[in-house]
Image (cartoon, rainbow, N blue to C red):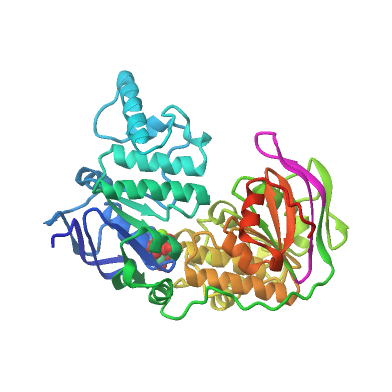
Amino acid sequence: MAYLLEMQDIVKDFGTLRANDHINLKVEEGEIHALLGENGAGKSTLMNILYGLYHPTSGTILFRGKPVRLNSPHDAINLGIGMVHQHFMLVPALTVVENIILGMPRRWGLVDLKTAAQEIREVARSYGYDIDPFAKVWQLSVGEQQRVEIIKALYRGARLLILDEPTAVLTPQEVRELFRVIRRLAEEKYTVIFISHKLNEVMELCTRVTVLRGGKLVGTVNTCDTTKEELARMMVGREVFFQLDKEPPSLGDVVLEMDKVEALNEKGLKALKGVSLEVRAGEILGIAGVDGNGQSELAQVITGMRKLSAGRIRIKGRDVTGTGARYIYEQRVAHIPEDRQAEGLVMDMSIKENLILRQYYRPPFAKGLFLKWPAIKENAVQLMKEYDIRAPHEEFLAKTLSGGNQQKVVLAREVSTQPDLIVAMHPTRGLDVGATEYVHRRLLAERDRGAAVLLISTELDEILNLSDRIAVIYEGEIMGVVPRDRADREELGLMMAGSKRLKAS
Ligand SMILES: Nc1ncnc2c1ncn2[C@@H]1O[C@H](COP(=O)(O)OP(=O)(O)OP(=O)(O)O)[C@@H](O)[C@H]1O
Ligand SMILES: [Mg+2]
């Protein structure tokens, strides 16, 4: 049969690195086709080629049976190819309508802006989206921004929609909503290429799956003929364990103590309302909750990046309330921040520099005012090996690493110093199954070494897999704390929606 899209023998080199190595991808009209692969496998690169952002080193693209040359996204859009990127590309200071028509070939005047707004509203409405075309993008939640990106692509006439890890940043409710829209599109003969690391999503939503590994094509299979386990094996090239073997915790002293902590968010509203928690050495306390219920502020007050408006925080018995981030770091507190690109890494710096960001001012990396480069390099070479950071060398810039490898750099820097307390927020967001398994093992190993771990995550599976006790946060309040062996998915779900735990734990 004729395919809507055929990418034939695509090669893409970045210098000496071959990101796509003779890849073939065939997509039928009206299908939801998953693109799977480990971090750095070459998925985004292949899709950026299809969207005209990168030129392939060699290879051919056939669209509706005809060879096409895509020199820019304009060419792609003209063919009806739209893309929602892994990291959104909207301009925050502009309105929704301005963002959508920005760069469109037609010249828009004031009157046209109104027309466009009306048309955008209608396109959105036909998919059950309620979008205010005159809202400024910075005012929108991540989920809303994604809707704008999708509407933008559809409004510009996309018939083939590329979604690069659209669910990584969404709440479970938003994921369901997105799936509803994707299915609607497929019913109307739109074609969707869906990138995700979540095998459950791929199995549920997609008809066929193409798997890449290390820039090479592993194969294309029908979801109805495969299993999660087989897909994981194809991606990683070995068996992946979805369940971790975990010893019961051996508890030590209290490391983190929070006593009726309150804090305000950027808008001056109370984001934490009397949070009291304790984490002991040798245990993982999971914080479950829907995104935006005070988790960011919680991590920030503990790591000294946000002021408390009331309450006290003690670390190993020492009152650290009102001290700063560096003081708290020096109490051996590690922080895996929620946004590795904005907070965890300096994207324009090399791996080796990123690995010493927190300690560049101390020996062995500095002597007086001078940095000791041999020690810095040595440190990087060793950590890259130990933490399986995949890059050609330690001078490689953080921004050119794949998401999973960026996270491993943060993890290596924070965890290699043997901290007493680890505050880990969304530590596996956007990571592939292999890297996720790796991060999970590492956090468990840290717990077994005797670190206290506070794990903040919106993935209930992750919380249930790793935690020894689970606290649920809702609108800045702790709804209850449940020991893992008594935790029940339904009950946690209810608490995440705001009902207080009634049973004593
Ligand atoms: N602009 C670039 N310059 C140099 N190397 C790059 C560039 N973009 C990507 N790479 C490299 O190409 C390889 C493939 O990266 P790509 O972003 O396509 O992976 P991916 O499969 O999308 O991974 P992830 O799941 O982490 O998003 C990686 O090794 C990456 O470091
Ligand atoms: Mg990618």
Residue name at image x 65 percent, y 34 percent: 267
Residue name at image x 64 percent, y 70 percent: 443
Residue name at image x 77 percent, y 43 percent: 262
Picture coordinates of residue 125, whole percent (x, y): 37, 33
Number of numbered markers: 0
For the residue pair 228 and 388, the one nearer the viewer reads as 228
- 277 relative to 144 in the view: left or right: right
Residue 468 seen in the figure: no
- 224 relative to 10 in the view: left or right: right
Stretch of the chain drawn in magenta: 259-282
Picture coordinates of residue 362, whole percent (x, y): 72, 65
Q: Looking at the rendering, in which quadrant would you find the C terminus?
A: bottom right
Q: Looking at the rendering, in which quadrant would you find the N terminus?
A: bottom left
Residue 271 within the magenta-colored segment of the rendering: yes
In terms of image quarters, where does ligand 1 lie? Answer: bottom left
Residue 336 within the magenta-colored segment of the rendering: no
Quarter of the figure with residue 43: bottom left
For the residue pair 240 and 362, the one nearer the viewer reads as 240
For the residue pair 291 and 228, the one nearer the viewer reads as 228
- 425 relative to 169 in the view: left or right: right
Q: Does the magenta stretch mainly form a helix, a strand or a loop?
A: strand
